[in-house]
Image: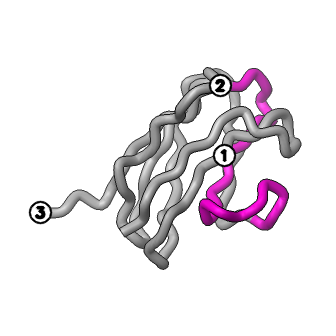
Amino acid sequence: MIDSQGQGTITNDEGPVACPLTANAGAPFTATVVGGTSSQDWVALYPAAQAANSPWLEFQYAPLPRPRTLTFTAPAAPGSYQLRLYANNGFTVLGSCTFPVN
């Protein structure tokens, strides 16, 4: 049996960010937001090479308190994707992680 979920943690430690090991195309996966200090911090899903202020594929606010687990849907197209945690309703990146979608 194949598990269609992945899990990752976005942290505000200015170091590497743990991501899902992989996510299956079109399947749900979760990420747990640990860092950030505002109820207006948000997480967006992008193709990995896409600029920070480009349109995202999906986004969600990460309200306080933290940690906060969010569920996203992996894109249908396989490739490299990134979750980015943005500060206070703006485009300041607090942390990001890159992971493959199979």
First reached walking from the N terminus: tag 3 or tag 1: 3
Q: In this view of the protein, can residue 56 be seen by the observer?
A: yes
Residue 72 falls left or right of residue 37: left
Magenta span: chief secondary structure: loop
Label 3 – label 1 distance at C-alpha:
30 Å
The answer to which of 6 and 22 lies nearer the viewer is: 22
Circle 3 or circle 1, nearest the eye: 1
Mark 1 vs mark 2, CA separation in Å: 13 Å
Residue type at mark 1: give it.
Answer: Arg
The residue indicated by pointer 2 is 14
Q: Is residue 53 magenta?
A: yes
Q: CA distance from mark 2 to mark 3?
A: 37 Å
Which three-letter amino acid code belongs to the residue tagged 3?
Answer: Met
Q: Which mark is residue 1?
A: 3
Image: magenta residue range: 36-55
Mark 1 lies on residue? 84
Q: Secondary structure at mark 3?
A: loop
Q: Residue furthest right?
A: 90
- Secondary element type, mark 2: loop
Check disc 1 and report its element: helix, strand or loop.
strand
